[in-house]
Amino acid sequence: MGETGWSPAFTFTVRTSADAVFLDTLAITDDLGPSGLGENTPAPAEDVAANAYKDTFLPGDPIQLYIYYTNEYPTNKQIDFEWLVTDPAGRVVPEMSETAVDTSNNANNSFYWHRAYAIPDDSIRGTYTFTGKITFEGMTTTQSQTFTVTGSTAVEVHDAFSTTSLGVASVDGGPGVPEASTPSDVISKTTPTYNAGDNIRLYIDAYNDVSANTAATFNWEVLDPEGRHVPQLEWGGILSTAVGHTWWSLPATIPSNMGTGDYIFTGSITYGGNTTSQTQTFHVNGVAAPANDNWANRITIGAVPYSNTQDTWTATSEVDDPGSSCGGTNSNSVWYRYTPASNGLLEVDASGSNFPVEIGIWTGGSLAGLTQVACNNEQDLASGKVMVENIPVTSGTTYYIELTDVGTPGGGKLNLNVNFVSSTSLTNDTIFNAATITNNITINNAGANTSQDVRAASASAEDLPLDACSRSAGRNTVWYKYTTTLPGELLLDTSGSDYDTMISVWSGTPGGSLTAIGCNDDIGGNPWDVDSSLTVYLDASITYYIQIAQFNGVDQNTNSLSTDGVGSKPPVSAEFNGGTLDLFSKFNPAPLLDLPVDGLYTSDTTPDLSVKSSPVPGGAVTYHFQVDDSSDFSSTLVEAPNVATTSYTLTAGEALQSGVYYWRASAKDGSANYSAWSAPRALYITSLISPVNNFVTSNTKPTFTWGATPGALEYNLQVDETPDFSSALEIDRYQTSGTSFAPTTALVPGDHYWRLRVRTGGAWTNVPFTPAWKFTILQALVAPVLDTPANAASMIDRTPSFAWFSVPAGNTYNIQIDTDATFGTPDVNFNTLTGNPISYQQPTDLSDGTYSWRVRAINLLGELGPWSLTRTFTIDNVPSDAPLLNLPVNNGFTSLAKPTFSVFAVTGPLPTASSGYGTIYQPGQDPVRISIWYHNHQLYVE
């Protein structure tokens, strides 16, 4: 059979099961319907075939990405989907990229799958690519669609990235000249890695949509892994950028002390009130954290003083850090430990560090179990010091010192100084152990010198309210004492001290009553001056106590006492102490005054002034006397220099008028050196004669006399019961002649005051009175009233006591006792002691017999008052007749436990004191022997 011809040709397609599901097309819209739903045909309202429903977006806009696919497979099977969006630089945008799996698709159908997103706010300008993928049975089909993201402002950040390219040089430390194209080594926004010390360049890709060069504010910001700014990698300012894309770069060097970790670079542009920004993360292989970054690895401090400098930039904070009560952040912490060998005071000083330091001192056995002892994070503005000081610490206890950054994380160069002062080195912490200051007491001596570390001074152990300056002192004090042999002036000066001092001088008994002699807080009264200077006058042969205190009780630091001179004072704050107390002391002796005594009233208008001893060895060459009516001698009335003897008498031309005056003296040696002035004495010049000042009299009409005043026209005499003459005057007499007055009306008993003034011309206006003199009129004495013994009393006591009632004005009493009622020659004539006693005990035995007694009062003047009424008493010690016993009978028996004893009455004297004895018997009891006798008119049973 022959060949036949070919049949008509047919075409067919061989397809595997993997071809049954394939991607048809993509779509982009801003429709934010439900995400992830499969939708049957027909397609959504947008024209999918046109592949373009919306293609331009702004950052933040909603966007929905569709994948349209066909499923020709007869049964449901798994389909894998992927949405992938890349930015203009080819970097994946994770906020708009994801994968999904579907196993519930309907066979033999077409579907739309979509995802709803929002354009990220930090999206850069440019064309983005959306790629949709479907994988079924190992076969993948893809399609891509593009869309554009435009800026929300005319000038904005398109991108931010870093590179090691150094490109164009920097301009004034800021960005270099803008580059026209992206650096060739920048291919993606992955995390690059650099080393500390590397040179890098930080780029801001700017996009200008304005038609001309436009100025905008650019800002480069870098944060380290702790969230701290890195100022060496930052810049901000205004730049003018061209139209379109320009790349601005900031050349910089990563600091060599940077720690290891991820750093975040943010580039931002502000234009028209809107700010856009982009970020990049880069990694730095930097410096490791300090060895003592953690509490477990603290540095041990051995010998003190101790100093250390370290960089804390890379220090971290531990999770269990206890946290300071001073309120700091505890960031960038480093740790030290110190164990004192004795009790004392600890000082930690971080002054000189280049970052704000907080100091914390702790005790405990673990980081989580620490207890804070002290802290401080405040810097003194005047001194620049940051420290904790005078912290009491205990021997053998370990103290942990933490140093951190006060505010935001940062750290820096830490400058640490630690010191310790043992409390055993301080001996004069209390007034009871005051150190002795010794000074030469000659004129013009150089003073004395002593030095002492007083940082360990504590609250005054004497617990006395010592605050002469009323400035809350009395804490952190040290004490010194100085004993005088002559009177004189003591100068104390703390100029040169580097903390705010207070000086006070006291007299009295330590632990008892103390009296403030003087005090100074600030030289010249200037509150901004921390030095103190005090000059006090000291009397002879007295020990004075000197207290050196810190103003307002703020604890001291290292303080030394120096009394050999005045030093120069460095700048200092009132709150923080430097360490040295410089005290200059110098005693300048003064003459010891003799006469007149202090406060003398005299009518002598040209008195003699004299000194008793000289402060100059071998005697003074001359003396200088001064008299003034003011205690400060501001306008001396009498100047008598170069007096060759120890006394000076005022001349007639120097005669003093009535009034109050003050006088003093100083001595001069052979080298013309003057001693200190003596303490001034008061001198009252008066024309009053009698009654003299403080006169006591019983005369109710005393005569007042005074000295004649030349040229007197009239005298005015006043007498009053008050020293200021404020009550109704008892006498207010004017007389033109005579220098005495005898009142006719009696003055009442009590204190009185009298004064006088003299008119020598014109009216009485402004004519002064003399100083008032006091006199006292005693009340008239009356007879005392007797108390015991009663009148006609009978007694056997041969040394009886006598008592009476006091009388007004009675100072002592005179008691007389006599057997003669006329008291011709009293057996007892005794005057009692002063103090108004009202009893008398006869010291020796009086004989038996009858006596009379009486009492009279004696006043302060020794004047006798009238006798009291006379009383009598009898002393009788002669025995009576012996009694005759009655019951119980001798050797009798009785059952009574309490028998009655009786005697027969007898008369006449008793020749013997004992009368007999007997025995009482009771059934079942031992016999009881009794004795009965008679003595001094009393019956006794035993």
Image: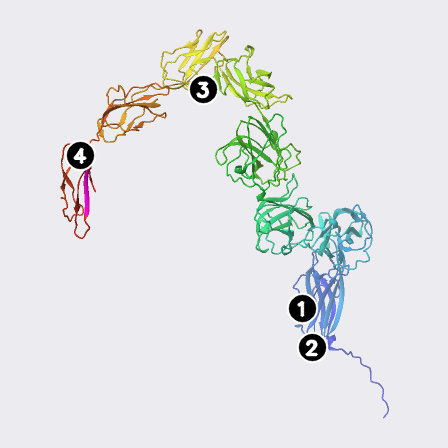
Q: Residues within 10 Å of mark 1 (few under 14, many from 20)?
A: some
In the rendered image, the quadrant that contains the N terminus is bottom right
Q: Earlier in the sequence, mark 1 or mark 3?
A: 1
Which residues are the magenta region?
Answer: 928-933
Q: Are marks 1 and 4 in contact (CB under 8 Å)?
A: no
Q: Nearer the viewer, mark 1 or mark 3?
A: 3
Q: Earlier in the sequence, mark 2 or mark 3?
A: 2
Q: Nearer the viewer, mark 3 or mark 4?
A: 4
The type of residue carrying mark 3 is Asp
Q: Residues within 10 Å of mark 3 (few under 14, many from 20)?
A: few
Q: Is residue 534 magenta?
A: no
Task: Measure how far apart labels 1 and 3 are at the Cα level.
Answer: 116 Å
Q: Earlier in the sequence, mark 3 or mark 4?
A: 3
Q: Are marks 4 and 2 in contact (CB under 8 Å)?
A: no
Report the residue marked by disc 4.
911
Report the residue marked by disc 3.
724
Task: Measure how far apart labels 3 and 4 are at the Cα level.
Answer: 78 Å
Left or right, 63 with respect to 730, comes to: right
In the rendered image, the quadrant that contains the C terminus is top left
Task: Measure how far apart labels 2 and 1 are at the Cα level.
Answer: 18 Å
Mark linked to residue 38: 1
The type of residue carrying mark 1 is Gly
Q: Residues within 10 Å of mark 2 (few under 14, many from 20)?
A: few
- Give above or below for 32 relative to 168: below
Q: Position of residue 181 (x, y in %)?
A: 82, 55
